[in-house]
Image: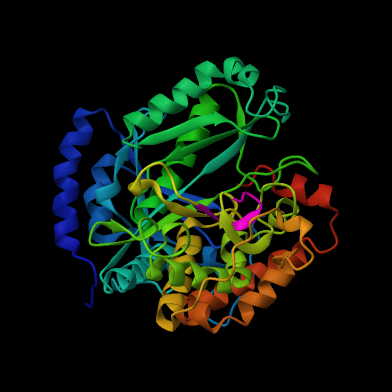
Amino acid sequence: MTTTYPRAERAAQARELGAQLTAAGIDGVVFGWVDNAGLTRVKSVPLAQLAHAAEYGVGAVPVFDVSLVDDSFTTTPSSTGPVGDLRLVPDLDRLTPLAAQPGWAWAPADRYAQDGTPHPGCQRLFARRVTEAVERRGLSVRAGIEIEWVVADAAGAPATAGPAYGMTRFVEHSDYLREVLRALTAQGSAVLQLHPEYAAGQFEVSVAAEGPVEAADTTMLVRHTIRAVSARNGLRVSFAPVFTEGSIGNGGHLHLSLWRAGLNLAHGGPGRHGLHPEAEQFLAGVLAELPALLALGAPGVASYLRLVPSHFAGAYRCWGLENREAALRLITGSTAGQANAELKCFDAAANPYLAIGGVLAAGLAGLDTGLPLPPETTSDPAALDAAERLPASLPEAVDAYEKSALLRQALGPELYETVLAVRRAEAELYAMHTDADVIEAVRWRY
């Protein structure tokens, strides 16, 4: 039997961890993965089955590759519908006891075929492949995703009416936020900031940068934790791109920096604002591919109700130092290690592995071609006649994605076609809906 992951070693690691988890009062382990619609799916096993799951995986039907946000399904030439089986194989290096769900631990899962070969549609394995391509060049990327969410009461209304960034809503929910902070800290997440955001009932948490795959894992874990803490406090939580029509939505801003031999290439270089040539070329590649990348980072019909001018969403394909209306905001930071770039046009409906992997692939293409970074936008792009608007709807983004030879090659034919099919199907699913209907349909799905 052909295998590409070390079954025996993983089983031994699971048995070793099992004793520690038993001592910690853990009864079961949740395995999580994110589908192409951006929904987090889970399966779990009792602790006694962890070693078997680590060695052979847990069955998962491959039809979830073509699931939509409403749990219906589309098809692709490679999809097999209800036929077949994949194996969810947990990454035990990321196994984490869940502070807000006593008795449970969590681990992200990779997906393999039954014979142990990688599933070509596995988004996490895709992100790892692109990360390894970056590392083969002697480079590394540090990444992190800001997580925004709306807290609602049992009736579904925003749970606070306090002003944006206001002390009022922070005081009203100080116990809840303390629980979020304590749970994340207990799980090993290095929280940088936790504060009220702009929209009604909205909060944001930022965690320290990590490697690309690890950053996507942490995004899953943080959201899982926020949802669990919210439930324990009788609150509902939404990560949907828009919660209330016309309001600022939930972003999933991606921060990243390029490094070589311990040197942050976004600081101390000869280029604009201290950029090194490699960093400029990398960011130029991302900007060039950004319309197509929206199909990965702003994947839903509701994403484009958020991605509008003058909503701090980055609706224009441009970059600028601390320009919060540009799609790509450059941040110099107060120290050499803090300098990074922020993609503001991505939202919380994205599969983080797809979003990060796609951005890395685009950045590598910029390095390959020595692509120059275009002129900086130093003012609000909405006021500029020449400012280039990013796609304003999912069909527009899908058109750009379909023309992207770069993403087709990076994702591989099966994953590329599956993402395309899901995006087309969701655009058709909500084609005749009003904006309010779309928001209502997906508000509690993410």
Judged left or right of residue 241, residue 270 is left
Q: Nearer the viewer, residue 343 or 117?
A: 343
Which residue is painted at 45% across and 47% down in the image? 220
Magenta segment: does it hold 326? yes
Number of callouts: 0
Residue 79 makes an appearance in the image:
no
User: What range is drawn magenta here?
Assistant: 323-330
Model colouring? rainbow
Q: Nearer the viewer, residue 270 or 7?
A: 270
Which residue is painted at 57% across and 71% down in the image? 374
Magenta segment: does it hold 302? no
Which residue is painted at 23% across and 73% down in the image? 3
Looking at the picture, does residue 56 appear above or below residue 20?
Answer: below
Chief secondary structure of the magenta span? strand
Looking at the picture, does residue 83 appear above or below residue 157?
Answer: below
Residue 222 makes an appearance in the image:
yes
Place of residue 214 in the rendered image (x, y in percent of width and height, measured from the top left): 35, 52
> Which image quadrant is residue 258 in?
bottom left
Q: Nearer the viewer, residue 148 or 274?
A: 274
**Which of the image's four quarters has the N terminus?**
bottom left
Which residue is painted at 40% across and 58% down in the image? 266
Place of residue 56 in the rendered image (x, y in percent of width and height, measured from the top left): 26, 61
Place of residue 357 in the rendered image (x, y in percent of width and height, measured from the top left): 44, 66
Place of residue 120 in the rendered image (x, y in percent of width and height, measured from the top left): 41, 74
Looking at the picture, does residue 261 appear above or below residue 174?
Answer: below
Judged left or right of residue 332, residue 132 is left
Judged left or right of residue 325, residue 373 is left
Judged left or right of residue 104, residue 377 is right
